[in-house]
Image (cartoon, grey):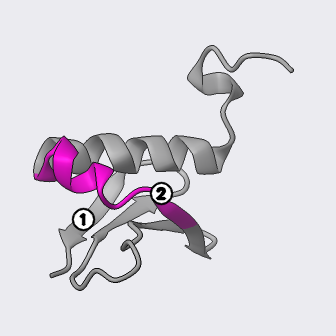
Amino acid sequence: MACKSNNAQLSEEEKVLMIAKDTAIKVYGKRIIQGELPLVATKKNDSLWVVEGTMPDGFVGGTVYVEILRDSLKVVRMTHYK
């Protein structure tokens, strides 16, 4: 199996997840985001990805929510639900 050594070899979904995670860590901190892994990316439509954190079983609260444009891979919205 080939090793993925640069972003050009990553799938669009992998790039989106990496962007969302890096951006969320800068805003909310590594400790918070690490507790919400894995992040899950879904295509909302032809132009937008939505990335959300996962909540461990038995926990109450919210997770990070990130919207990323598909054409430019720019974050257009990010929040953290409580």
Which residue: 15% across, 82% down? 82
In the picture, residue 58 is in which quadrant? Answer: bottom left
In the image, 36: left or right of 14?
left
- From what the image shows, is residue 55 above or below residue 72? below
How far separated are the C-alphas under marks 2 and 1?
17 Å
Residue 61 lies in quadrant: bottom left
Q: Residues within 10 Å of mark 1 (few under 14, many from 20)?
A: some
* Disc nearest the viewer among 2 and 1: 2
Name, please, the residue furthest toward the right.
Answer: 1
Image check: 34 left or right of 38?
left
Q: Is residue 31 magenta?
A: yes
Point out residue 57 in the picture as x, y percentages from the top left corner: 41, 79
Part of the protein shown in magenta: 28-41
Which residue sits at x=27%, y=66%? 77
Query: Would you place residue 14 above or below residue 48 in this image?
Result: above
Q: Identify whether 76 is placed above or below 5.
A: below
Under circle 2, the secondary element is loop
Q: Which mark is residue 78?
A: 1
How far across and down, in percent of the image, does residue 22 sit? Answer: 31, 40
Which residue, given by chain and number where applicable, does mark 2 sit on?
38
Check the picture and name the quadrant holding the N terminus. top right
Looking at the picture, which amino acid does disc 2 mark? Answer: Pro
